[in-house]
Amino acid sequence: MPAVGQPFNAIFVRPVATVDNTSAQDRTLRNDLAATLRLRTPLASEAHPLTVTGYWSAQTYRYRASADTLEARVNRYGLRASQERTIGRHAVQLAVDAWTDAVDDARGFATAAPTRQRLHLRLRHASQLAGVATEASAGLQVGAGLAPSATLRATGAVAGVTLTGAVATAPDMPARVVASGFGETLRPAPAGAPTPRTNRASLRAAATLGPFDIALFGRYLERRNALDIMTEPIAQGALEANPFDAFFPDAAEVVRSPSPYRQVSGGLELGFRRTAARGLYATAQPTAFAFLNTTASPAHTRVAESLPPAYGEARLGARYVLFQDLDTDASLRGRAWAPFSSRTLHEPTGTLAIPQQGSPTFGPEGALDLVIEAGLRGATLFLVWENVLSGTDVTPGNLLVPIYPLPEQRLRFGVFWPITG
């Protein structure tokens, strides 16, 4: 077993592994029903009719362990409407979404689970002027107070380089399990906590040079009053005695960030014959992440450690025709990540929780898939050999979630056939 803060030095071996809580079960049942009506009105042309959708969703979650059974059931009833108009180079859309949550069974929740209502209003405008395409939206969420949202995106070209910039701000409504907790296993968000909000900004510059394309991008992310599920800390002595206990939390809690989480990322998008209909092609996208205020609080440190400082993915493939009408795409797809502690599974809720500071890390690691796709008369057949190097001398095993390795050398196949009309 690794020392505290050190990488994993072993991987899960199925024939000799010990599995805890073998009798524990969780089950999610969900039903959805929706009906959509499209109407032509004086303001709604045949191309852009008024669209009204009524919907109902029912979800039941049940966790059964040897000691107890926790269950919660919620129904959501909603009505959604949207109307779009195009006038010259301008497109305007108004969208309204109203819903209410009714709790049928609240036995699993740790605190009172009152009915929640929300009304979302959004106005979107898109236009193109002087070679610059813009899209802007403004919204308002009404429920637990008033929470505005807004986005702005612009795209233009200068000297053969396509520039895209975007900014956005939006409220984040906490999930029911975050707001109300779950039995004694998850303590809910602090009462009266402000509505979380996410602010984003991005900039991208792209150019094409013959068969090659290259793009440089940067992103900024800020989360205010963020609510994250975190494992309850283990005593340092116990953690040093058994570091893996950090990934088997008996209980977790919802922690509000004492100050904003701030993160930046940037990277490259590289391509060779990316959209070619026939022949070889290749793409790659390395990305680097940095947490700007890691030491602002213990919560900041834990969130920062749960994210990889670098991540990359690449693809090498060929497109060709078999048997005259079988349009085939065969490729190798790889991804790799730097060391990080990730998030551990909180069994009673089925959510991923941030482990405590100093938990073991894993990586650098990667995975490689072999993918074959073939199109035939509107249908797409696929054959995927996932994680082909795992379980070999090259890669004994790999993980994205602690203790739960990615399936090794798994074969999947199927068909996708869209049916319309």
Image: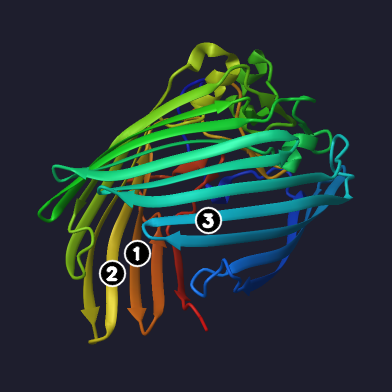
Residue at figure coordinates x 30%, y 39% from the top left: 204
- Image coordinates for residue 26, horizontal then vertical, percent: 74, 52
Marks 3, 2: nearer the viewer: 3
Report which residue position mark 1 lands on. 371
- Indicate how the structure is coloured in the image: rainbow
Residue type, mark 1 in image = Val
Relative depth, front residue between 108 and 387: 108
User: Rounded to the nearest whole Å, what is the CA distance between mark 1 and mark 2?
Assistant: 8 Å
In this view, which residue lies farthest toward the left?
210
- Vertical arrangement, residue 358 with respect to residue 341, above or below: above
Note whether residue 391 is visible.
Answer: no
- Image coordinates for residue 49, horizontal then vertical, percent: 56, 70
Q: How packed is label 3: few (under 14 Cα within 10 Å), some, or many (20 or more)?
A: some
Earlier residue among tags 1 and 3: 3
Residue at figure coordinates x 63%, y 17% from the top left: 258
Q: Secondary structure at mark 3?
A: strand
Report which residue position mark 2 lands on. 329
Q: Is residue 349 left or right of residue 158?
A: right
Relative depth, front residue between 71 and 225: 225
Q: How packed is label 2: few (under 14 Cα within 10 Å), some, or many (20 or more)?
A: many
Q: Could you tell me how many numbered marks the image carries?
A: 3
Q: Secondary structure at mark 2?
A: strand
Q: Secondary structure at mark 1?
A: strand
Report which residue position mark 3 lands on. 93
Relative depth, front residue between 9 and 124: 124
User: Rounded to the nearest whole Å, what is the CA distance between mark 3 and mark 2?
Assistant: 38 Å
The answer to whether mark 1 and mark 2 are in CB contact below 8 A is: yes
- Image coordinates for residue 61, horizontal then vertical, percent: 78, 52
Earlier residue among tags 1 and 2: 2
User: Rounded to the nearest whole Å, what is the CA distance between mark 1 and mark 3?
Assistant: 39 Å
Q: Is residue 1 left or right of residue 32?
A: left
Residue type, mark 2 in image = Asp
